Image: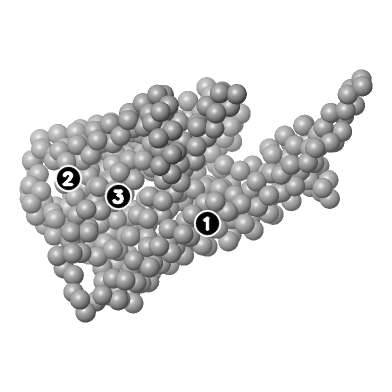
């Protein structure tokens, strides 16, 4: 490992990319500690420590919400806009064609629409969040002028983070949005550890030990799911051109157990946060029926068992959804047929596409269930031990480990590319 780190920093281009990403993350952390105008942050600490829903939302925003900073929503609106656009591709074939068949120009246009959709979502979510915190007596009265300023600044902060994420993605070492969430998770670790140390009770030693064991199991499980794959054998027909024989080789098509990576977790969190936040917003409504329904939904999402079951189901569904977006059996079958390749024992064309679809559905089932189980495992352990200090530990570990694995792979691929250039 030490030798590989030395190799990374010996390559000037790669070293500059890593230093650039670190500088971007420093800028993000500075922005996450600049409070919005007209907001008193002192009374927020206890509230976020004792509220699971807002604690997860704070993690999802990269730690900007606990300070009511200029980036209090993080990249949440951008991810929500991405989910909406991905869902629209399943409704409108024109959008799917733009994204997949029109090349780089189509993808840039699709991404531009996603960015435009982020702006109203950021303004709407900021307005809802500020009013929600006011309804919880966390914030005092905010005048109309202050509210307008907060909406403009917070929306600009989200767009700023979106731009920073795209700058990171352009460096080819990982996904910028995931990096920003990862930075928020890492930045929250020192305060979480210090809080555990100050409240440590020796009688609960085995409970804390169980949390540590669960953390290691989660890390091992995420690595296994991300690295696991099934190799589909592929053979290429022989072609005779003049005196030369081409093809006739055998290789394999790797199908990963988790094609979607960390995206299902991020999607599931964004969806799970929304009903609770919306319900809390209407709890103090003047309409008694609306208020009662909002209280029921808010209490429902505070229930550990319901929350865990819904979270598990969302992870499974989004794993299938995003796998369907990134993996197209028909397209892969067509490409194999055009290149003279075939799966032994399976006819080329539609039969190959159906075979690949069955295989990916089976391995995605096991991968999604395993991923969902790891996501809710800390909630189960918390229910058994009664310790709430690491409520969102499983989700944090899932995102952090997945981001690190992806980053290591990207760096290794760039090192290998430079080794080939040496030859």
Give the percent coordinates (x, y) of residue 178: 38, 42
Q: Which residue is mark 1?
A: 224
Q: Secondary structure at mark 3?
A: helix
**Dot placed on the residue nearer the N-terminal end, 2 or 1:** 2
Q: Which residue is mark 3?
A: 185
Give the percent coordinates (x, y) of residue 85: 46, 38
Q: Mark 3, mark 2: which one is toward the viewer?
A: 3
* Spatial CA span between label 2 and label 1: 37 Å
Which residue is at a point 30% across and 49% down the rendered structure image?
Answer: 185
- Considering only vertical position in the picture, is 370 above or below 238? below
Q: Quadrant of the N terminus?
A: top left
Say which quarter of the image contains residue 241: top right
Which residue is at a point 25% across and 57% down the rendered structure image?
Answer: 55
Say which quarter of the image contains residue 238: top right
Q: Is residue 159 left or right of residue 149?
A: right
Q: Quadrant of the C terminus?
A: top right
Q: Is residue 398 left or right of residue 290?
A: right
Q: Mark 3, mark 1: which one is toward the viewer?
A: 1
* Spatial CA span between label 3 and label 1: 22 Å
> Residue furthest toward the front?
3
Which residue is at a point 45% across and 31% down the rendered structure image?
Answer: 172
* Spatial CA span between label 3 and label 2: 17 Å
Q: Categorize mark 1 by other alpha carbons within 10 Å: few (<14), some (14-19), many (20+).
A: some
**Dot placed on the residue nearer the N-terminal end, 3 or 1:** 3
Looking at this view, is 196 or 418 the one in front? 418
Q: Which residue is mark 2?
A: 68
Q: Are marks 3 and 2 in contact (CB under 8 Å)?
A: no
Does residue 341 appear anywhere in the picture? yes
């Amino acid at each position: 490992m030490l030798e590989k780190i030395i190799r990374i920093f010996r390559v000037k281009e790669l070293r500059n990319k890593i230093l650039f990403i670190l500088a971007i993350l420093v800028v993000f952390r500075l922005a996450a500690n600049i409070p919005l105008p007209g907001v008193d942050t002192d009374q927020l600490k206890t509230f976020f420590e004792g509220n699971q829903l807002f604690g997860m939302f704070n993690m999802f925003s990269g730690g900007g919400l606990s300070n009511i900073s200029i980036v209090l929503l993080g990249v949440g609106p951008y991810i929500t806009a991405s989910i909406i656009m991905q869902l629209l591709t399943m409704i409108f074939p024109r959008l799917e064609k733009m994204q997949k068949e029109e090349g780089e120009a189509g993808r840039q246009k699709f991404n531009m629409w996603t960015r435009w959709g982020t702006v109203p979502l950021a303004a709407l979510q900021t307005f809802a969040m500020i009013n929600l915190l006011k309804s919880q007596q966390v914030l005092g009265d905010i005048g109309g002028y202050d509210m307008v300023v907060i909406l403009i600044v917070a929306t600009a902060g989200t767009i700023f983070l979106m731009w920073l994420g795209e700058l990171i993605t352009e460096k080819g070492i990982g996904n910028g949005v995931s990096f920003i969430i990862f930075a928020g998770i890492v930045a929250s670790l020192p305060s979480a550890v210090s809080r555990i140390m100050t409240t440590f009770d020796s009688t609960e030693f085995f409970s804390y030990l169980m949390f540590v064991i669960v953390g290691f199991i989660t890390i091992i499980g995420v690595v296994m799911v991300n690295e696991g794959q099934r190799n589909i054998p592929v053979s290429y027909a022989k072609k005779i051109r003049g005196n030369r024989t081409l093809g006739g080789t055998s290789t394999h098509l790797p199908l990963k157990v988790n094609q979607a990576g960390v995206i299902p977790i991020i999607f599931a969190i964004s969806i799970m946060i929304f009903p609770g936040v919306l319900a809390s917003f209407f709890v103090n409504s003047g309409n008694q029926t609306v208020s009662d329904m909002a209280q029921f939904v808010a209490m429902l999402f505070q229930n550990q068992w319901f929350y865990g079951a819904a979270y598990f189901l969302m992870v499974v569904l989004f794993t299938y959804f995003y796998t369907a977006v990134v993996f197209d059996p028909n397209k892969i079958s067509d490409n194999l047929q055009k290149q003279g390749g075939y799966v032994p024992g399976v006819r080329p064309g539609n039969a190959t596409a159906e075979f690949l679809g069955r295989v990916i559905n089976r391995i995605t089932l096991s991968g999604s269930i395993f991923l969902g189980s790891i996501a809710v495992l800390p909630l189960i352990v918390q229910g058994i031990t009664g310790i709430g200090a690491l409520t969102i530990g499983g989700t944090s570990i899932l995102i952090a480990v997945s981001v690190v694995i992806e980053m290591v792979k990207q760096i290794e691929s760039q090192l290998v590319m430079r080794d080939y250039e040496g030859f």
